Image: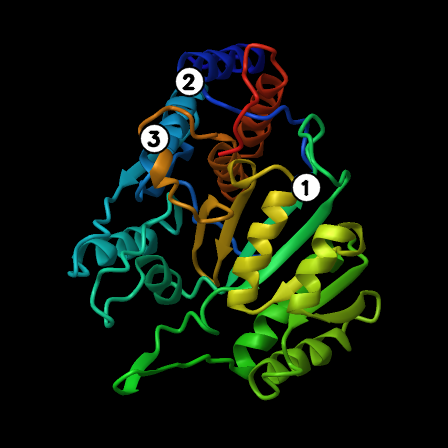
Amino acid sequence: RCLSARQISHVVIYLSYFHDYHAHVICPLNVIHYVYLQPPPAKYGGRHTVALIPGDGIGPELLNHVRELFRFCCVPVDFEVVHVNSASTREDDINNAIMAIRRNGVALKGNIETNHTMPPNHKSRNNLLRTSLDLYANMMHCQSLPGVHTRHKNIDIIIIRENTEGEYSSLEHESVSGVVESLKIITRNNSLRIADYAFRLARDKGRRRVTAVHKANIMKLGDGLFLQCCKEVASGYPDIEFDSMIVDNTTMQLVSKPHQFDVMLMPNLYGNVVSNVCAGLVGGPGLVPGANYGRDYAVFETATRNTGKSIANRNIANPTAMLLASCLMLDHLKLHDYANMIRGAILTTMNETRVSHTHTF
């Protein structure tokens, strides 16, 4: 039978206590629903099927917690589990995962480890998944959580990262022995697309400013094109302030004066760096959920994409980020009542004294 919200809180408390989770005290979040992409229609009986990719490291155990909580809550979601072997040079597994996402339209995933011992032509499975499905927009909502002891309070930053090109284009070669060239790809169409997404989100959510992060002072053509596209799009949104900042200065400003930022827009590599900095500002990678959106598909995961392999199978991984990512997924599927119920239960549980508060991951 389905449980009440109060009973679900007790279930989460039980799971936290039984599995010895190390969590932080947190409070209700200012939830953002990214609804530009329409979710797939529900099947007979109002149920949805979601691709579930456990990934490596702590991914499988975190997703097991999601499945257990969904079962207690009677969430009308069925999972199609697809395992990806990151140690294999064959692409059968990742192709199966991509097909599962195409079939279902939505996925919840753990991070797939990038094996650095693989040959140079071996592509990152995470990158291959994002580019194959054209998941061009990565979203991270970085918020201060009362009860989490951090240097800065009341942080509320949305990070929007271009997700399909830049330095992550997987185009490298050794031109002569000892000389490697790595190509950074910036295109006008993709830059305009991600910039328009950022400004639309800012307008819809009542945000006041978009800051483009770049290195156009050095990479005058690549980052220069990205910055110019941001300026072009900004001219169509006179109600939203626009400014820009060089990436190295951005990292310094984030750790010293983070409150100056509202919506941050950046290419792929800078987004990776800035997302991790922001996660650290609010308490660590185990607290922040993330989402990847394209025109047709949505994939939800933890924001920092860390496998946490060093703490796998020890029952000390903080499940908060993955549980909140699953709530974002439910919001995307328009199952808002379930999302709010589970989110509220999680946040209530995190305030329980029976949950220890020693680790962030």
**Residue at the spot x=42%, y=41% of the render?**
42
Look at the numbered discs 3 and 2 and tell me whether their residues touch, using CB distance below 8 Å.
no
Quadrant where the N terminus sits is: top left
Sequence-wise, the earlier of marks 1 and 3 is 3
Mark 2 neighbour class, 10 Å CA radius: few under 14, some 14 to 19, many 20 or more:
some
In the image, residue 163 sits, relative to residue 297, either above or below, namely: below
Mark 1 neighbour class, 10 Å CA radius: few under 14, some 14 to 19, many 20 or more:
many
In the image, residue 308 sits, relative to residue 229, either above or below, namely: above
Three-letter code for the amino acid on which mark 1 is drawn:
Gln
Q: How is the image coloured?
A: rainbow
**Residue at the spot x=58%, y=72% of the render?**
193
**Residue at the spot x=53%, y=32% of the render?**
360
Q: Distance between the residues labelled 1 and 2?
A: 28 Å
Residue 298: in sight, yes or no?
yes
Q: Name the residue under label 3.
A: 61
Q: Distance between the residues labelled 1 and 3?
A: 25 Å
Q: Check residue 143 in the rendering and tell me which mark sits there, or answer none.
A: 1
Q: Check residue 72 in the rendering and tell me which mark sits there, or answer none.
A: 2
**Residue at the spot x=60%, y=80% of the render?**
223
43 or 351, which is in the foreground? 351
Residue 58: in sight, yes or no?
no
Three-letter code for the amino acid on which mark 3 is drawn:
Glu
Sequence-wise, the earlier of marks 3 and 2 is 3
Residue 330: x and y in percent read: 50, 37
Residue 205: x and y in percent read: 73, 51
Mark 3 neighbour class, 10 Å CA radius: few under 14, some 14 to 19, many 20 or more:
many
Q: How far apart are marks 3 and 2 (CA)?
A: 17 Å
Residue 56: x and y in percent read: 30, 43
